[in-house]
Amino acid sequence: MSTEHLPIADRRETLRWLRGELRARWGRAAGAFAVGLLAAAAGVTPVYALGVLVDRVRAGAPSSDIVGITVVIVVAALVAGVTTAVSTYLIAGLGGRILATLREDVVARAITLPATRLERAGKGELMSRVGPDVAAVNKAVTDVLPTMTSSALLAALSVAAMVGIDWRLGLAGLVTVPMYVVALRWYLPRSAPGYAVERAAVGERSQLLLESVQGLRTVHAYRLETPHLQGIDAASARARDVSVNVFGLFIRFVGRVNRAEFVGLAVIVVTGFLLVRDGAVTVGGTAAAAVLFHRLFNPVSMLLYTFDELQAGGAGLARLVGVVSIPDEPREAAADGRSPVDSTLEVTGVRFGYPGGAEVLHGVSLRIEAGQRVALVGSTGAGKSTLAAVAAGILQPAAGSASIGGMPVGLMDPVLLRSQVAIISQETHVFAGPLIEDLRLARPGASDADIDAALATVGATGWVQALPDGVRTVVGEGGHELTAARAQQVALARLVLADPAVAILDEATAEAGSFGARDLEDSALAATAGRTTLIVAHRLTQARSADRVVVLEDGRVAEEGGHDELVLAGGRYAQLWAAWESRTPTFP
Amino acid sequence: MPPTTGSRILRRSITRNRGRLARGTGLISLHQLAEATVPVLIGVGIDRAVAPGDGTALLLWVAALGTLFVGLHLCYRFGARQLMLAIANEAYLLRGELAAKIVHPRRLRTDLRAGELLTVSSTDADNVSYLLDYVPRIAGAITATAVSAAVLLVVDWRLGLVVLVGTPLVLVGMQFAGPLITRRVTEQQELAGKATALATDLVSGVRPLRGLGAERAAARRYHDVSQASLRAALRAAGTQSRYLAFSTAGSALLACGVAVLAGWFALDGRISVGEFIMVIGLAQFLLEPIGLLAIVPSWVAEARASADRAALVLGAELLLPPGAVQEQKPEPDLVLTALRHGTLEGLDLTVHPGEFVGVVTPRSADGEAIVRLLAGGVPPGEFEGSILLGGVALHDLEPAQARAVMLVEPHQTDLFTGTVAANVAGPSPADRTRLLAALAASAADEVVDGHPDGIDRHVAERGATLSGGQRQRLALARALLAHPPILVLHDPTTAVDAVTEQSIARAVRALRQERTTVVVTSSPAILAVADRVVVVDDGRVTVEGGHADLGATHDDYRKVVLR
């Protein structure tokens, strides 16, 4: 299904977004930059002052000259300490705030993405955006950005100080810049694919490990220990070899950086030699330039070595900005304060096809009077789930419409829509965290009593109370594992809390074990009592207990009527019912 | 005997990589020695070439600097490569040991969950191996500091003394902040991890969220966690920057103090201008090794914590006894006597060779307990009564042998990345005819029919690309193909429609003709083909007989299996 990827912003879009964010926080940004500049200046000052001292020594100045210079140096050291700290904090804070806004926008956008877009991109892609991509940007912002900024500023100010001593010394220092650039341009295009291969190898290793751990029961049952270990070992050895190879590349990069350092230092001293000979620069000035340059070895190489992390952060950023800038699906103008007159659900002449696929629904019409229960029956692929999603306003039909109480669902704004109709889809998910927090997603203000009442309605009180911490037990991923049937009950309890006038249940009981299924049918009946209900029935007992049955075949309504009526009619439904009944033994 | 404490794991990482580690550490120390020589050489160059304007000396100096850089890089190049090999090797070895322990047939007794076991065998194994990176770094930093101090002592003993006294003072000062920073950074990482986990969890439940219109509530919840994460990040940045203020100022004062003292001596004429410049360079250079020495203890502590977690796994007991008996009768019977475990309260059940027995458990906990016991994962001390396979107690059999005799396919299906064929047949290439027969019997042929790759159809991680029903039928095919003397199935057809369920029941019965089969289920289609049906309620057998007879005579039975 994942044929179309989510968009990735290009460089221009990403930069435009970044500029916008910085402009929105221009005060903080300017402050961080100014303090950073001050910190770099304070870092350069002592070396400069010591250069002056060298000249005084050579000129045979008195010992008392040390006092003034000492004061300058001590003050500079203290200022450097404070301003380095403040600027690091300000930069981390600025980056952190921008990132927090971005990740919240990304998550908000991800969970409100137009349904068809979500289906096409697949959930995995979306999860990689809100997971690894956010983590990559986070790492770049917290680990790399502050040091990198201060290193860059220190380098800039050191060169400025060298220019201040003599512009030719500054120029000599700048000789290394093209060498560094060449080294980076050699390294990055090689390391990026190398790291990608490394990540893939590590990913494969982790996946094999995790699968073996999660499927340990099966590994033991089928005595798969040895083949699984062999698989893990092979993947682990591959990851090891890839890492060693990528590191080989890094070592050669370091060689190029060392070469640039040597050339830069030699050129500065030779330039100083010539300038001193011509009397343009003092020996102290040359010494200061050389020491300033030497002192940049570490920060500059750190800057270069972390460049790929910055690049990874940039790539992650582009992918996040890409998600944020996905436009909303065009909706018709929202209705002007109108609301549905009752909870009658009506579907008229609905046609629908998934993008790039054949039409699934070929003009389906259906009406459920307020408070009635209709079961939708049909074989796999008949279009039941699609019809349910259209009726719930999740999918927009190509033709025809779904309406509640006379008002088309496409014209309702999202808040009104969901107060009218809720759908429980085939996919169950227990949200990680305390169970009560999961339920409160459906009604954020729900009191403990509301929660208890909802659980009682769906018949879940017993097992919830038996959980280690009752309703506050941490469930879902990494917590207490709920069985499929219990997860379904949780979904039904959410429905009770959301309290919509129209409820749509899509095969909500199909996957549960056979004993649980009957209990779940009771839960579903209780949860939908008093609501207009469309139930996609997999178990025909659900159809029998409904007010009316609609049989869908190949995207069209094939039959419609009461259970008994249809069984007597001897059509498609009668066939399905016969098959279902034969599953139930007829005892003498 | 694997190491069972964190410090033993760390020690072993050093001893078993000692060759590479020694060579690497030696070369990296030499590299640091060369690095410390650079500022000395700068001083010499200014003093001997630039100040007197001596062109020959300048050429010599450039040649010396070039040689130094070549040597410096070669040391790094070969040293770092040795260390990288050692690190990668250690991580690989440790990971292998951890994985072998985790999937040990006798099973691990541990409280760690799947995710935590994964973290131990990936992140923690890596962290332990990084010790082999820290050792040479420490050695290098000590070398660089010692060389610098030695040069300063030669220039003037008081300068050397300032470094020798000042460095430990600055280091000790920095150590105070260490634990606090670690705590704040850990807190920040935890909250960032929590935010990420929430985001992926919400996205993975996006369809249920939308069905309820809970998107806004979810976005608000993420907003809260994200803001908490931001606050933690700011707190951590605050702590780190305060630390940075003191460490930057402290080490700058130390460096400048040495330089100023040298300047004073130079003004007095006690040292030469060249020596003064040398001292300026050295004092600046010293900041690097000092900074490294300040941070290394927290790294080592991290490696130690990871080693402790690895020790939890490597040192964990095995759950099951080794089991001495290797031989088994070809067609053993299965005799359960007075079993008490979980909700079972004295279960007696005998299954004869070749019998097909349906077990109905109105209370699902009873069924789960039976399956858990038969799967062999419950150690002898944790249940009462006996499980005999052909007269031999289950846990007297060697675990792999026991699994070979009696196979339990769990209700919760696990599939693995690979092809349909590999999932159903396992690693050894299967007889294609038998494979297709097993797929047909479990109605799983639909999964491969009409797919271009047929039985080589790809199965994604944990079977995510297949529906629940498809996964269930593939697992059944796998169990049928394994064809064990005794097969135990648990609700194998819950995600299958009525018509298919009947054909599956008949086909399974036919395939298991000569062999023993126990199915815990309430499916009338399966119970109808069983030789005998046993009802287990309230922890013991309440009634048994043929499916039709029970249905005719027992109202309770009818209620349980009637739908």
Image (cartoon, coloured by chain):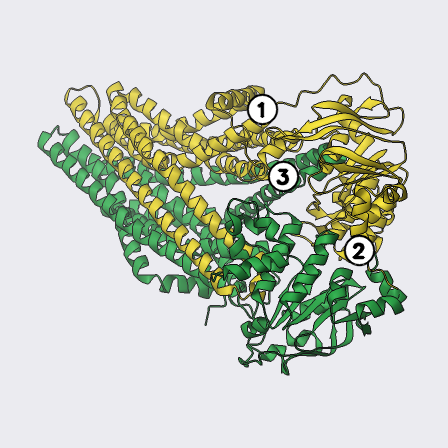
Q: Is residue B143 left or right of residue A393?
A: left
Residue ID at (19%, 38%)? B65
- Where disc 2 sits, the SS reads helix
Task: Tell me the quarter of the image containing the N terminus of chain A.
Answer: top right
Label 1 secondary element: loop
Q: Amino acid at mark 2?
A: Ser
The residue tagged 1 is A325
Q: Is disc 3 placed on a helix, strand or loop?
A: helix
Q: Whole-Å distance between the Cαs marked 2 and 3? A: 46 Å
Residue B199 numbered tag: 3
Chain under label 3? B
- Residue position marked by numbered label 2 in the rendering: A582
Residue under the image location 58 percent in, 34 percent down: A121
Residue in the foreground of this view, choosing between B206 and A131: B206
Q: Are marks 1 and 3 on the same chain?
A: no
Say what amino acid the circle numbered 1 marks: Ser
Direction front: furthest residue: A570
Chain bearing tag 2 is A
Residue A542 in picture, x, y percent from top left: 83, 46
Horizontally, residue A111 falls left or right of residue A306, namely: right
Residue at position x 30%, y 50% in the image: B81
Q: Earlier in the sequence, mark 1 or mark 2?
A: 1
Residue type, mark 3 in image:
Ala
